[in-house]
């Protein structure tokens, strides 16, 4: 259930960035390292995690973004920090 919610949010950001309506993304596809997400998308993702799961991610720590670079990693991060 959580992963589907994450996937839907990620797809909505990718569509907003101009990707086609039939966005094809696997759970292990990179979002940040691959530059599919820009800095505004990362900010929206961190706000989503704060609002939906009460999880804070420091924007000053670049290593923290490596922990949320894929749908699977985001799901794992949520599970570990709930």
Image (cartoon, helix red, strand yellow):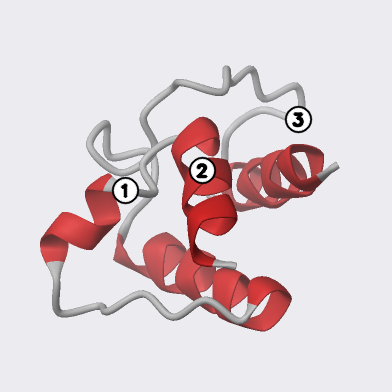
Q: Secondary structure at mark 3?
A: loop
In percent of the image, x 60 and y 52: which residue is there? 13
In percent of the image, x 66 and y 82: which residue is there? 51
The front one of 48 and 82 is 82
Q: Alpha-carbon neighbours of circle 1 within 10 Å: few (<14), some, or many (≥20)?
A: some
The span from disc 3 to disc 1 (Cα, nearest Å) is 27 Å
Question: In the picture, which quadrant includes the N terminus?
Answer: top right
Q: Position of residue 25 (x, y in %)?
A: 58, 21
User: Any mark on residue 21, and which?
Assistant: 3
- Label pair 1/2, CB-CB below 8 angstroms: yes
Question: In the picture, which quadrant includes the C terminus?
Answer: bottom right
- Mark 1 highlights which residue? 67
1 or 2: tag closer to the N-terminus: 1
Front: mark 2 or 3: 2
The span from disc 2 to disc 3 (Cα, nearest Å) is 27 Å
Q: Secondary structure at mark 1?
A: loop
């Amino acid at each position: 259930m959580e992963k589907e919610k994450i996937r839907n949010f990620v797809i909505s950001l990718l569509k907003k960035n101009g990707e086609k309506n039939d966005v094809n993304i696997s759970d292990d596809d990179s979002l940040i390292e691959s530059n599919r997400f820009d800095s505004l998308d990362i900010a929206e993702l961190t706000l989503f995690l704060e609002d939906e799961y009460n999880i804070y991610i420091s924007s000053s720590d670049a290593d923290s973004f490596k922990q949320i670079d894929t749908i699977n990693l985001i799901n794992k991060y949520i599970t570990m920090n709930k």
